[in-house]
Image (spheres, rainbow, N blue to C red):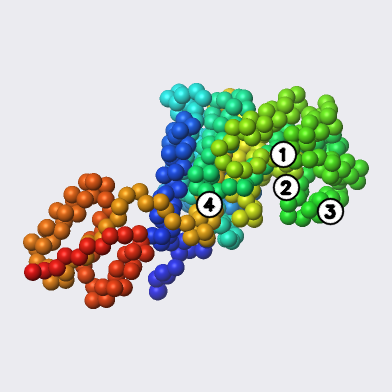
Amino acid sequence: MALKKKPTTGMKDILPEEMEIRDYVINQIKETYKTFGFQSIETPCVEHIENLNSKQGGENEKLIFKILKRGQKLNLESAQTEMDVVDGGLRYDLTVPLSRYYANNAAALPNPFKALQMGNVWRADRPQRGRFRQFMQCDIDILGEPTYLAEIELILATTTLLGKLDFNHFTIRINDRKMLKGMAKYCGFSEEEYDDVFIVLDKMDKIGMEGVEKELLEAGYAADSVAKCTDLFRSVTNDIAGVRYMKDTLGNCLDEGVAENLETIISTVGALKSADFNISFDATLVRGMSYYTGPIFEISMDEFGGSVGGGGRYDEMIGKFTGNDTCACGFSIGFERIVMLLLERDFKVPAAGARKAYLIDRKADSDLFRKVMEKAKAEREQGVYVNINRMKKNKKFQKEQLMSEGYTEIEEFFAD
């Protein structure tokens, strides 16, 4: 059987040009987030299947790459259900592993704990532009902070990073799950219907107000509730005035402090931001993860035509491991999409130091090799990048290739 040289569907080989940009972005992420007090951690790529199937990951739980039991534990003959043969899976995000990590290590961690986690995740999704089955995620989370300080810090840290990567004119869309529930209650939907109604609302940017209205009616929801819901969205604005309108309109259906907290987050981020972006209230923002319990947010970029990151508050997830709820809030940037946009811009990584290439005569003896190696060693100790190559027949093409790779100085060494 012939071996296949192409990667499996939805995964890719990364060439040096892209890898240089990825390394640069990773370094910028680590340097920027550390200035905000975040500490790097790492979790395994394989999680217990019970954790992944805990009804916390929304639609992602349908996309798990599952791992068969091994050795004597795997008994295909007696297996009756999938759980008889599966005990693990590749993580589909970094939030579930972080919650398990914190539950297991909280006694050794500061409170509050500001975590930075980067790593590959896997989803058996349909590949498309900017979406793969294996992709890097980059999360920052604040655990143990109950106030809106966490949301403000997460948004400021993330937008500061995007500004350093020369992304501007993007929008942070923000809402609150409690605002959504207050809206659903006000409109007359039953509590059992909330999640299904939210799934339809989340399609607003794709099918529009009329499409949402039609889909809700076709699903059998009361016409009065649907009309009340769409009237709300037609009236609300995407600024602080919109937050106040929702507060006044929803009245007792909205939990105390929700609108005030959203207003504080929006106004504080707007006043303290260091990048050029807008922050707007979006009453239709839902986000698919069922574990969100409070403020939720997304990064929208016209350059991409969709979301390039998002997050929110999930105060109840860690409690599923420990029995005691722990305040938690996180923000994840779309690392792969950011890198893709930089590649499409023909982005060049700023030179960290001088780059030199040495070309050695093909007839060079061992003494000349040693001399060149010693010179390269001295230059590298001074922070210079030195690439040593044998001289090729087509030296002109070789030099052009090296220069295209960023080697601005080329020195030749000939045999006597």
Residue 126 appears in the rendering: yes
Q: CA distance from mark 4 to mark 3?
A: 32 Å
Expressed as whole percent of the image width and height from the top left, the position of residue 174 reads: 68, 39
Instruction: Locate residue 203, reporting x and y percent.
Output: 74, 51
Q: Quadrant of residue 132?
A: bottom right
- The residue furthest right is 224
**Residue 92 at x, y percent in the picture:** 54, 47
| Residue under label 3 | 210
Q: CA distance from mark 3 to mark 2?
A: 13 Å
Mark 4 or mark 2: whose residue is earlier in sequence:
2
Q: CA distance from mark 2 to mark 1?
A: 15 Å
| 3D distance between C-alphas at marks 1 and 4 | 23 Å
Q: Secondary structure at mark 2?
A: loop
Q: 112 above or below 16?
A: above
Check the image and report above or below for 347 versus 94.
below
The CA span between labels 4 and 2 is 23 Å
Callout 3 amino acid = Glu
Q: Amino acid at mark 2?
A: Asp
Q: Amino acid at mark 1?
A: Phe
Residue 317 in view here: no
Q: Earlier in the sequence, mark 2 or mark 1?
A: 2
Residue tagged by mark 2? 202
Residue linked to disc 4: 338
**Label 1 sits on residue:** 281
- Helix, strand or loop status at disc 4: helix
> Which residue extends farthest bottom?
393
